[in-house]
Image (tube, grey):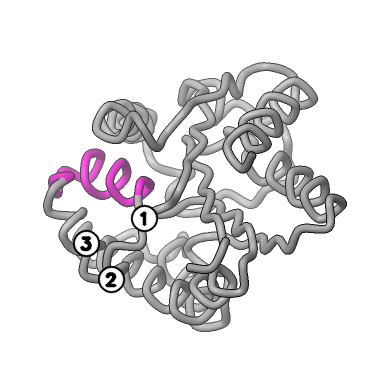
Amino acid sequence: MADGVFITFEGPEGAGKTTVIQEIHRRLADTGRPVVLTREPGGIRIAEKIRSVILDNDHSEMDGRTEALLYAAARRQHLTEKVIPALEDGAVVLCDRFVDSSLAYQGYARGLGIDAVLAINEFAIQGLMPDHTIFFDITPKQGLARIAASGTREQNRLDNEALAFHEAVYEGYRIVRERFPDRIESVDASAPLETVTGNVWAKIVSFIS
Protein backbone atom coordinates (compact mmCIF):
# COMPACT_ATOMS: atom_id res chain seq x y z
CA MET A 1 0.00 0.00 0.00
CA ALA A 2 2.06 2.90 -1.32
CA ASP A 3 4.78 3.57 1.25
CA GLY A 4 2.46 3.49 4.27
CA VAL A 5 3.62 1.86 7.48
CA PHE A 6 1.24 0.32 10.01
CA ILE A 7 2.60 0.32 13.58
CA THR A 8 0.57 -0.91 16.54
CA PHE A 9 1.08 -0.64 20.28
CA GLU A 10 0.03 -3.26 22.79
CA GLY A 11 0.19 -3.88 26.52
CA PRO A 12 -1.75 -4.53 29.72
CA GLU A 13 -3.98 -1.93 31.34
CA GLY A 14 -2.00 0.96 32.79
CA ALA A 15 1.06 0.42 30.60
CA GLY A 16 1.22 4.10 29.64
CA LYS A 17 0.79 3.54 25.90
CA THR A 18 -1.46 6.52 25.24
CA THR A 19 0.93 9.13 26.63
CA VAL A 20 3.93 7.71 24.80
CA ILE A 21 2.10 7.30 21.49
CA GLN A 22 1.02 10.94 21.55
CA GLU A 23 4.63 12.03 21.90
CA ILE A 24 5.75 9.66 19.14
CA HIS A 25 3.03 11.10 16.92
CA ARG A 26 4.30 14.62 17.59
CA ARG A 27 7.90 13.69 16.80
CA LEU A 28 7.01 11.93 13.58
CA ALA A 29 4.83 14.84 12.48
CA ASP A 30 7.77 17.18 13.09
CA THR A 31 9.81 15.22 10.54
CA GLY A 32 7.29 16.21 7.88
CA ARG A 33 6.14 12.67 7.17
CA PRO A 34 2.37 12.14 7.09
CA VAL A 35 1.30 10.37 10.26
CA VAL A 36 -2.07 9.27 11.60
CA LEU A 37 -2.75 8.54 15.28
CA THR A 38 -5.72 6.31 16.09
CA ARG A 39 -6.95 3.70 18.55
CA GLU A 40 -8.98 0.52 18.93
CA PRO A 41 -11.70 0.00 19.53
CA GLY A 42 -12.56 3.40 18.12
CA GLY A 43 -10.85 5.86 15.85
CA ILE A 44 -13.98 6.59 13.82
CA ARG A 45 -17.61 7.32 14.69
CA ILE A 46 -19.09 3.84 14.35
CA ALA A 47 -16.20 2.12 16.11
CA GLU A 48 -16.30 4.64 18.96
CA LYS A 49 -19.96 3.77 19.50
CA ILE A 50 -19.07 0.08 19.63
CA ARG A 51 -16.28 0.95 22.09
CA SER A 52 -18.77 2.59 24.42
CA VAL A 53 -20.88 -0.59 24.41
CA ILE A 54 -17.90 -2.86 25.08
CA LEU A 55 -16.39 -0.83 27.91
CA ASP A 56 -19.57 0.30 29.66
CA ASN A 57 -19.48 -0.75 33.32
CA ASP A 58 -23.23 -1.45 33.12
CA HIS A 59 -22.60 -4.27 30.64
CA SER A 60 -21.08 -6.76 33.06
CA GLU A 61 -23.29 -9.53 31.67
CA MET A 62 -21.64 -9.36 28.24
CA ASP A 63 -20.69 -12.79 26.91
CA GLY A 64 -17.08 -13.36 25.89
CA ARG A 65 -17.96 -14.28 22.32
CA THR A 66 -20.12 -11.18 22.01
CA GLU A 67 -17.18 -9.13 23.22
CA ALA A 68 -14.83 -10.71 20.68
CA LEU A 69 -17.27 -10.17 17.82
CA LEU A 70 -17.84 -6.54 18.77
CA TYR A 71 -14.10 -5.88 18.78
CA ALA A 72 -13.77 -7.50 15.35
CA ALA A 73 -16.69 -5.47 13.98
CA ALA A 74 -15.22 -2.21 15.26
CA ARG A 75 -11.85 -3.22 13.82
CA ARG A 76 -13.27 -3.89 10.38
CA GLN A 77 -14.99 -0.51 10.12
CA HIS A 78 -11.92 1.26 11.49
CA LEU A 79 -9.69 -0.39 8.89
CA THR A 80 -11.89 0.36 5.89
CA GLU A 81 -12.72 3.90 6.90
CA LYS A 82 -9.45 5.17 8.38
CA VAL A 83 -6.42 2.87 8.42
CA ILE A 84 -6.42 1.56 4.85
CA PRO A 85 -7.00 5.00 3.24
CA ALA A 86 -4.16 6.45 5.34
CA LEU A 87 -1.79 3.66 4.33
CA GLU A 88 -2.73 4.10 0.68
CA ASP A 89 -1.81 7.78 1.06
CA GLY A 90 1.64 6.75 2.33
CA ALA A 91 1.13 7.70 5.98
CA VAL A 92 2.63 6.12 9.08
CA VAL A 93 -0.36 4.85 11.04
CA LEU A 94 0.12 4.62 14.81
CA CYS A 95 -2.64 2.52 16.35
CA ASP A 96 -3.21 2.01 20.07
CA ARG A 97 -4.17 -1.71 20.14
CA PHE A 98 -5.10 -4.05 17.31
CA VAL A 99 -5.54 -7.79 16.73
CA ASP A 100 -3.03 -8.84 19.40
CA SER A 101 -5.26 -7.35 22.09
CA SER A 102 -8.13 -9.58 21.02
CA LEU A 103 -5.88 -12.63 21.04
CA ALA A 104 -4.65 -11.89 24.58
CA TYR A 105 -7.89 -10.61 26.13
CA GLN A 106 -10.61 -12.66 24.47
CA GLY A 107 -8.59 -15.51 23.03
CA TYR A 108 -6.58 -16.36 26.13
CA ALA A 109 -7.99 -14.52 29.17
CA ARG A 110 -11.63 -15.17 28.24
CA GLY A 111 -10.76 -18.74 27.30
CA LEU A 112 -12.18 -18.57 23.78
CA GLY A 113 -8.97 -19.85 22.21
CA ILE A 114 -6.32 -17.78 20.46
CA ASP A 115 -6.85 -19.59 17.15
CA ALA A 116 -10.62 -19.11 17.30
CA VAL A 117 -10.33 -15.37 17.93
CA LEU A 118 -7.63 -15.08 15.29
CA ALA A 119 -10.02 -16.68 12.78
CA ILE A 120 -12.72 -14.12 13.60
CA ASN A 121 -10.24 -11.33 13.07
CA GLU A 122 -8.76 -12.77 9.90
CA PHE A 123 -12.26 -12.47 8.44
CA ALA A 124 -12.39 -8.84 9.59
CA ILE A 125 -8.94 -7.67 8.50
CA GLN A 126 -8.47 -9.72 5.31
CA GLY A 127 -4.77 -10.24 5.93
CA LEU A 128 -3.86 -6.69 6.90
CA MET A 129 -1.60 -7.30 9.89
CA PRO A 130 0.65 -4.58 11.33
CA ASP A 131 4.09 -4.06 9.84
CA HIS A 132 5.49 -3.71 13.35
CA THR A 133 4.19 -3.91 16.92
CA ILE A 134 5.63 -2.57 20.16
CA PHE A 135 4.58 -4.29 23.37
CA PHE A 136 4.65 -2.21 26.56
CA ASP A 137 5.82 -4.73 29.12
CA ILE A 138 4.56 -4.09 32.65
CA THR A 139 3.13 -6.49 35.23
CA PRO A 140 -0.62 -6.36 35.88
CA LYS A 141 -0.07 -5.26 39.48
CA GLN A 142 2.10 -2.33 38.40
CA GLY A 143 -0.29 -1.29 35.66
CA LEU A 144 -3.40 -1.40 37.81
CA ALA A 145 -1.58 0.47 40.57
CA ARG A 146 -0.81 3.23 38.09
CA ILE A 147 -4.46 3.51 37.12
CA ALA A 148 -5.53 3.68 40.76
CA ALA A 149 -2.87 6.25 41.62
CA SER A 150 -3.53 8.55 38.66
CA GLY A 151 -7.08 9.36 39.68
CA THR A 152 -7.62 10.89 36.23
CA ARG A 153 -8.73 7.86 34.26
CA GLU A 154 -12.28 6.59 34.61
CA GLN A 155 -12.14 2.84 35.14
CA ASN A 156 -13.96 0.86 32.47
CA ARG A 157 -15.42 -2.64 32.46
CA LEU A 158 -12.07 -4.29 31.69
CA ASP A 159 -10.17 -2.28 34.31
CA ASN A 160 -12.60 -3.61 36.91
CA GLU A 161 -11.89 -7.26 36.17
CA ALA A 162 -10.19 -9.26 38.94
CA LEU A 163 -6.40 -9.38 39.09
CA ALA A 164 -6.50 -12.99 37.89
CA PHE A 165 -8.03 -11.83 34.61
CA HIS A 166 -5.30 -9.25 34.05
CA GLU A 167 -2.65 -11.83 34.87
CA ALA A 168 -4.22 -14.11 32.24
CA VAL A 169 -4.09 -11.23 29.73
CA TYR A 170 -0.38 -10.79 30.47
CA GLU A 171 0.21 -14.51 29.91
CA GLY A 172 -1.81 -14.30 26.71
CA TYR A 173 0.44 -11.55 25.46
CA ARG A 174 3.48 -13.71 26.23
CA ILE A 175 2.07 -16.45 24.02
CA VAL A 176 1.22 -13.99 21.25
CA ARG A 177 4.71 -12.49 21.37
CA GLU A 178 6.21 -15.95 20.98
CA ARG A 179 3.92 -16.61 18.04
CA PHE A 180 4.90 -13.44 16.17
CA PRO A 181 8.52 -12.79 17.22
CA ASP A 182 9.50 -11.13 13.94
CA ARG A 183 6.76 -8.51 14.26
CA ILE A 184 6.54 -7.79 17.99
CA GLU A 185 9.28 -6.26 20.12
CA SER A 186 9.05 -5.20 23.75
CA VAL A 187 9.97 -2.19 25.84
CA ASP A 188 10.16 -2.03 29.62
CA ALA A 189 7.08 0.06 30.41
CA SER A 190 7.87 0.13 34.14
CA ALA A 191 10.74 2.55 33.47
CA PRO A 192 10.30 6.34 33.79
CA LEU A 193 8.10 7.87 31.10
CA GLU A 194 10.96 9.75 29.46
CA THR A 195 12.99 6.55 29.19
CA VAL A 196 10.11 4.56 27.75
CA THR A 197 9.39 7.28 25.20
CA GLY A 198 13.03 7.40 24.14
CA ASN A 199 13.21 3.64 23.75
CA VAL A 200 10.00 3.50 21.71
CA TRP A 201 11.14 6.37 19.50
CA ALA A 202 14.47 4.64 18.82
CA LYS A 203 12.71 1.41 17.82
CA ILE A 204 10.30 3.19 15.49
CA VAL A 205 13.01 5.25 13.80
CA SER A 206 15.08 2.11 13.33
CA PHE A 207 12.15 0.20 11.83
CA ILE A 208 11.02 2.97 9.49
CA SER A 209 14.58 3.60 8.35
Q: Is residue 62 visible?
A: no
What residue do we see at 27% from left, 26% from top?
178
Which residue was labeled with disc 3?
63
Q: Secondary structure at mark 3?
A: loop
Mark 3 and mark 2 lie on one chain; the one further toward the N terminus is: 3
User: Where does the magenta region start and end?
Assistant: 100-114
Indicate the amino acid at tag 1. Met
Image position, residue 118 (x, y; %): 20, 54
Which numbered disc, 2 or 1, marks the residue closer to the eye? 1
Vertical order, 74 against 60 (above or below): below
Vertical order, 190 against 24 (above or below): above
Q: CA distance from mark 3 to mark 2?
A: 20 Å
Q: Secondary structure at mark 1?
A: loop
Mark 3 and mark 1 lie on one chain; the one further toward the N terminus is: 3
Residue 113 lies in the magenta stretch: yes
Mark 2 and mark 1 lie on one chain; the one further toward the N terminus is: 2
Which residue was labeled with disc 1?
129
Which numbered disc, 3 or 1, marks the residue closer to the eye? 1
What residue do we see at 61% from left, 43% from top?
208
Q: Is residue 22 visible?
A: yes
Q: Quadrant of residue 205?
A: top right
Which residue was labeled with disc 2?
124
Indicate the amino acid at tag 3. Asp
Vertical order, 184 against 43 (above or below): above
Residue 112 lies in the magenta stretch: yes
In the depicted view, which residue is nearer to us: 189 or 208?
A: 208
Query: Mark 1, residues whose alpha carbon is within 10 Å: few (<14), some, or many (≥20)?
Result: some
